[in-house]
Amino acid sequence: MHVLYGIVLLQLIDTCVATLAIRRQLGSEPAGAFCGIDTDCFTNVCRDQRCCRYSNYTDGIKACGSAGRYELCLAGYFRSSESRLCESCPTGKHSSDEATSCSSCPAGSWNNSNICTDCIPVTGASPGATYTCTSATDSRVSACDGNKYKTVGATGATDTCTDCVAVDGAKSDATYTCTSATTSRVSTCATATPKKTVGTTGADTCTASCADGTWVNSDVCTPCTDVTGAKSDATYNCSSATDSSVSACAAGFELSKGTCFSCGTCMYTDLTSGTCPVDLHITTVDECKLAAQSFRWVDTVDTSIEVDSPVQPTGCFLHRKTGLHFNRDESSTSKCSSSFKCACKMECTAGKYQSGRICTKCKVGTFSTANQKNCTAYDEKACLIGMYATNTASVCELCAANEFNNRVDGTCVACQANQTSSVDRTKCISISAAEDGISVWVWVGIAAGFVFLAFLPFLVWYCNSHNEYNKLAEW
């Protein structure tokens, strides 16, 4: 009996040993301890566990997984669903601990060996600023704080935020904005220099008074409003945004009380009989006032009254009793008279100038183009190419035949031999080329003659066969 019990005991021991061996082979329990979830593969007691045996213990392994049958990976590594091994994320991608995939780094960070690292903050950046970077040394910031300006860093360097440069004469507690070291905008000027001028290309300035050409708008020196038709170098005066007064007007405009009026030739005459030519009617109230001013119809310019009357002259006229009027009725046939003195536009031809209410010929040694108020002293630079002026002519004239002028400041020069001048006198052309222009028509005429002679016998035969010869002869 004792022998039988011994045999059974030995069989139980063999079965236990075999079971432990099988369990160690399957990795469910290594020798000496059970390695479960989050067990460190680097400890000696777990080295033989299955997940650890299938790796090299160093490539991104954080711990063994469930029942030791797969790996948990460190940041920068991932384990796909098809593998139980930790793999390094591809270049440009990252992962967190225990990840099963990799992704790009979010905005405001950079990929640091497959681990996303926040961009280094820029000193002086706006509290809500955003960042981009590719390393720890090249942070790019979206905006600096309100009183600073941003300088973009060179390659590999971080952006910088720098305080705005202070404005001389600014209040001590003034606030600033700027986009560079030379564009400081200040909130308030000091009491001694209260007038602020907003810089156009540079910084603001604080002064005791505003400069010419500006007006004070809540202690801000504001440029006068532009006047249409003003000369480019004209000076301005104003006390508000609506009362700009200009010193000079461009060509085609006339200056009247600081305002420029479009008036074409800006020349006027008055009539006490007949009517103004249709194309010389004054067509606006403003120009009517301008004409009245040129005639020195003083005390009437500012009392212009618009009318619509068929019994008064069309356009601008001065009534003997009621003053200046502008009649919009274009169908009126009423004549100008001593009681209804009409104002009309006037035109002067080249070589003449406006002298009062008439056109007068320029004096010897001077000349003019059309519709001028004065004549210009002889100057060869004043004529167009192909023309010239002399001190005895009152207009620019074409160069003589066989002469040309191709410069505004030039004179007429003779063409070379075998050349003649073009029609506009701006160049010389060969005589043969000029003749070619005529010979073409000569050849056309000759060709037409040959065609007629070739068909003449047929024409005679046709007319003769139809008893039309006699009629042809008579013809």
Image (spheres, rainbow, N blue to C red):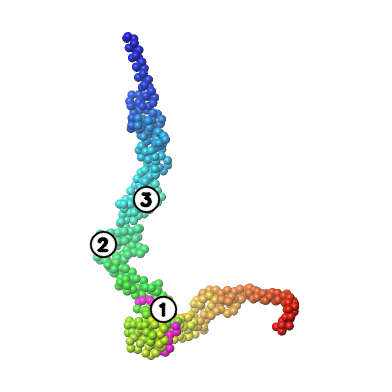
Element under disc 2: loop
- Residue 263: numbered disc: 1
Q: Please give the residue where the numbered disc 2 appears in the rendered image.
A: 171
Q: Position of residue 222 (x, y in %)?
A: 32, 68
Asked which secondary structure carries label 1, the reply is loop
Q: Residue at x 49, y 77 (%)?
A: 382
Q: Which element type, helix, strand or loop, lies under badge 3?
A: strand
Q: Amino acid at mark 3?
A: Arg
In the image shown, does 303 or 453 lie closer to the viewer? 453
Q: Is residue 377 visible?
A: no
- Is 340 or 176 nearer to us in this picture? 340
Residue identifier under label 3: 140
Of labels 2 and 3, earlier in sequence is 3
Q: Residue at x 53, y 80 (%)?
A: 397
> Which of the marked residues, 1 or 2, is nearer the chain's N terminus?
2
**The C terminus - image quarter:** bottom right
The disc, 1 or 3, on the residue closer to the chain's N-terminal end is: 3
Q: Is residue 269 magenta?
A: yes
Magenta residues, as a range? 258-278
